[in-house]
Image (spheres, rainbow, N blue to C red):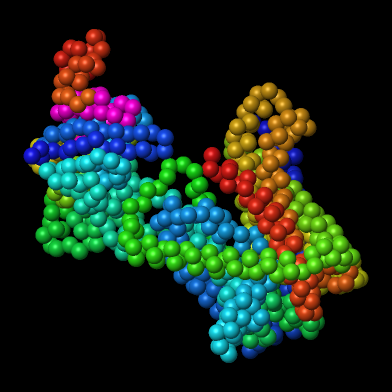
Amino acid sequence: MFDGIVLDKTALTLGTTHFDFDCRIEAGAITAIAGPSGAGKSTLLNLVAGFEQPQSGRIFMTGTEQTLSRPSERPLSVVFQDHNLFAHLDVFTNVALGISPSMRLSPHDRGRIEDALTRVGLEGFGKRMPGSLSGGEKQRAAFARALVRRKPVLLLDEPFASLDADLRVRMSDLLLKLHRETANTVIMVTHDREEIARVADRVVLVEGGKVASSEAKADYLLRFASPASTRPGTV
Amino acid sequence: MLTLAERRRGIGAGLTVLIAVILFVGTAVVTLLAWDGDQSASRLFTAYTWSILRFTLLQAALSTLLSILFAIPVALALARRPGFPGRVWIVRLMALPMGLPALVGALGLLGVWGRQGVLNGWLTAAGLEQPVSVYGLSGILLAHTFFNIPLAVRLLLAVLERLPAEYWLLSASLGMKPFSIFRFVEWPALARVVPGVAGLIFMLCATSFTLVLVLGGGPAATTLEVAIYQALRFDFDPPRAIALAFLQITVTAAVVGLVTLLPAATDMVRTAGRSIQRLDGRSGPSRLWDFFVIAAAVIFVASPLLSVLAAGLRADLWKLVTGPRFIQAATTSLAIAVTAGTIAVTASLAILNARQAIRDRRDPNLAERLLSTSLAGTSSLVLVIPPIILGTGWFLVLRQFGNVGDFAPYLVAIINALMALPFAVRVLEPALEDHRRQTARLAAALGIGGIDKWRLVDIPVLLRPILTALSFAMALSLGDLGAVALFGSSDLVTLPWLVYSSLSSYRTNDADGLALILGVVCLFLTILGTAGRKEHNNV
């Protein structure tokens, strides 16, 4: 049994656009979803997350079928580009909602939340409101919530797209660190080739509502690198 | 960017409007307060005035509470169901009572809930003896909730719809149950605006005149505004009217002051843009509850409107509109509405232009900044000094110069214009602001000014918002009974006054027909007056 994520001929029509995804995403790896805007990257992610349901085809995760299950029943956490935190709740509560959506917390849970905040570099930020955080700090808090949820799959929808270049590098490092610690399966929508080079193991290319290719990062970069930038270390 | 002459003209016009408004309002207030001061002061704290004050505040507080309590589940249900059948029309339906003259709404409510209304008809048919009574406190509350639940629904729905789409996806992904979503997402968003919405509704209910006049019963269910009216119109007791007016100004000033401190709410409901996806509330009971709540709101709001329509169509409309009484009243109403609308729009333009002219200077001096602030406050002045107070004050002034009836039409037009001023400013401000941003530099660079600028640059763009503001102001004036109530006589009959007097003399058939005509005209003008605004805000 394949223990990654399988989209088995999942088809969906939104408005006039038709999507038809068929691919396998390996467990324990970081897979980047690349492709031009409007190609269906986010739709693919929404199907995996359960925000959209396919009109035909099936979806499997860690060996079980999840085609019709609700988002909260799926073994995954989601981090969006923006608005990951409820602006009127403090950081601690935002993270804690990942453990208990009705805020029933044991002392042990509280310890885990503080621990997760420390691991993402937000020690002592629990009482802060999201409005007082920088863009990078907000995304760190979202990562802390994903950590406490202990789900095997992490979905990222352009998580660093609204951050500046330096911060993107540091957040990529944090993502890699957390990935090594938890050995989770990461699916990350991105349009940033440098980011793919930094963090991804594999790349799924989406074009025209279909999966055009699914390959190792090195192969993908080789195919799309221009001759001038094939030297090692540059992309 | 403006030339010196342009700036001077702009500021001069604004200053003129400011002085005119202050003179008009000030004369009324000063006359009131100076009139027979000793006698009024002794009348200020009688058992009678206290009971009126208490009732005014009580009914406003209850109306506000009920409106908010019922509006919250409706707004939540509508927000949860972006794909509810006919949702766009339901949201539009919620905008109708705002444009409906209070008197017409009251007639519609009587048609449904009144002694001879549909509901009591059914109850009697079902063998129930005790009819539902809509006079007194219950009638006032019914009418205030009819007008304010839809308002609150729109304001609260707008807040929920402005929440980031990610919030709903996130709460679904975290597995939040309906109560958790309410506690952590919906309620915190609503809680920020509920005080502002409640303040607004409280103010509308504390100063509501027509509804209390028609549906309130006797001294036990009378508000300050209606008591002032009765003191002048029936008992001719100026000291009592003045004492009550003093209380009224104190109450409204306190409420307006409080409301401006609270965060404002807008009713810009999202009609375009990214669609919201709600994954919660998929369970059967939740669907059933939302359907029930939305259906109840629709029936509550639509039934009086349908009643106005049905009752109006039963009247002999053709005979009515060709009758001399109607033609005279319609002509008077139209003349007053056009005058009031023109004054309101002209004054708004002058106010906004002056404020732009002041802002145009790199560092305005103290006097200019002060003027800009006063201009911004001018339009809210009318909220503090209700029409009935302006009417009372001027009534006392003009009495010294002859027959008040001779001045009445002009007075009513000016008071209506002042009432419409805040709305006209609100419609015109964003349009003018956009227009200035887009054209100011270009016009300055090309050296277009004066008449040419009006003809070539301003009028083509601003004509639409100006007409929009005009139709909104005219709708307000056409439907208003408050200002005309003090002066209405056989010499001065407006359409609302004609409806009201037909109603008081038990010519209900005529009243129904006239109410339908008046309601349709006012709704039409209000829809014209809001269509442009919505479009503007969705860009």
Image quadrant where residue B432 sits: top right
B32 vs B510, nearest the viewer: B510
**Farthest right residue?**
B402
Residue drawn at point x = 29 percent, y = 29 percent: A210
Residue drawn at point x = 81 percent, y = 57 percent: B334
Up-down: is B407 above or below A33? below
Residue B300's spot in the image, x, y percent?
55, 69
In the displayed structure image, the side of residue B486 where residue B111 appears, left or right = left
Residue B160's spot in the image, x, y percent?
43, 55
* Residue B374 in view (yes/no): no
Residue numbers of the magenta segment = A187-212
In the image, residue A200 lies in the stretch drawn in magenta: yes
Residue A4's spot in the image, x, y percent?
13, 38
Residue drawn at point x = 24 percent, y = 17 percent: A224
B241 vs B367, nearest the viewer: B241
B53 vs B32, nearest the viewer: B53
Residue B226's spot in the image, x, y percent?
69, 77
In the displayed structure image, the side of residue B197 where residue B421 appears, left or right = right
In the displayed structure image, the side of residue B291 where residue B102 appears, left or right = right
Residue drawn at point x = 49 percent, y = 48 percent: B270
Image quadrant where one finds the N terminus of chain B = top right
Up-down: is B386 above or below A233? below
In the image, residue A230 lies in the stretch drawn in magenta: no
Image quadrant where one finds the C terminus of chain B = top right
* Residue B313 in view (yes/no): yes
B387 vs A224, nearest the viewer: A224
Up-down: is B516 above or below A227? below
